Amino acid sequence: MQHRTVSDVMTHQVATVRRDAPFKAVAELLAERDVSAVPVVDDAHRVVGVVSEGDLLRKESGQPDPEGHTPSLWMSPSNRKRARAENAEGLMSHTVFSARPEWSVVEAARMMDRHHVKRLPVVDETDRLVGIVSRSDLLRVFLRDDRAIRGEIISEVLQRVMLIEPATVSVEVKDGVVSLQGQLERKSLIPITERLCRSVDGVVGLRSRLTFAFDDTHTDLEPPVVRGVMQPQRFHG
């Protein structure tokens, strides 16, 4: 069982600009490609910054209003400088958070959430730009068909990883919400099964009515071995 990767959902053909791209050229590119930001790259196609619509609007907000007031007085020195910029190098944000193609969509989502960004340039092992992934790209996993989610839970989670016969557990999926019902051999298998089901791409929620035949959580028995899942060690003193 494996999460979709950034490479699976990212945009491969990325609109980029060089440091010396004029303000108007950047604005035209954003409008033409219907994107809200573009990476700024050097001669080796490495990302050195990002220019967004917000960076361009800073110039507009820094203009005097009809009454002659100068809004730039309340702007920080760095923002006043960027408001006067005429090319991408002066406009761009120099701090760039990026992703790798092999990252899972979960890793990319966490990076976006942690740094409050809407998109991540995707770079290879040499830091060359190979794509860009946005919030909307990551949300595509929640558009997965209910039948595809159910099929993955049955074949990957129950059969391959947990070694549970499909007839043992009833799996229903509606609008991404998974319902499980049935009896497992051991109580300790229930939280593991539920956790793996929640981790399947496209799962919005989980409703579990799983029961157990034997409570092994208060004995000295070894924990169940689940293929591909690390188990906590128990020490007997």
Image (tube, rainbow, N blue to C red):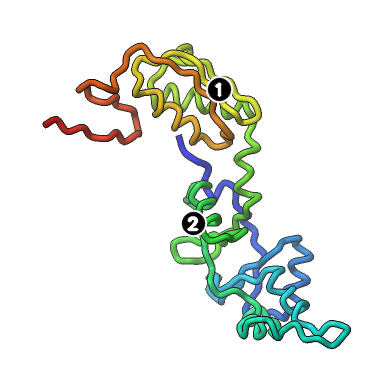
Q: Which residue is mark 2?
A: 100
Is residue 41 shown to the viewer in this render? no
Q: Is residue 108 above or below residue 43?
A: above
Which residue is painted at 55% across and 75% down in the image?
A: 94
Q: Is residue 79 above or below residue 32?
A: below
Tell me the kind of residue under disc 2: Arg
Judged from the image, the secondary structure of the residue bearing numbered disc 1 is strand
Quarter of the picture containing the N terminus is top left
Q: Nearer the viewer, residue 136 or 217?
A: 217
Which residue is painted at 70% across and 70% down in the image?
A: 54
Query: At which x and y percent is residue 96?
Result: 54, 68
Tell me the kind of residue under disc 1: Ser
The nearer-to-camera label among 1 and 2 is: 1
> Position of 53 compared to 66: left or right?
left
Query: At which x and y percent is residue 209?
Result: 49, 18
Whole-angstrom CA distance, mark 1 to mark 2, is: 34 Å
Mark 2 neighbour class, 10 Å CA radius: few under 14, some 14 to 19, many 20 or more: many
> Position of 172 compared to 234: left or right?
right
N-terminal of the pair, mark 1 or mark 2, is 2
Q: Which residue is mark 1?
A: 179
Judged from the image, the secondary structure of the residue bearing numbered disc 2 is loop
Query: At which x and y percent is residue 138?
Result: 60, 48
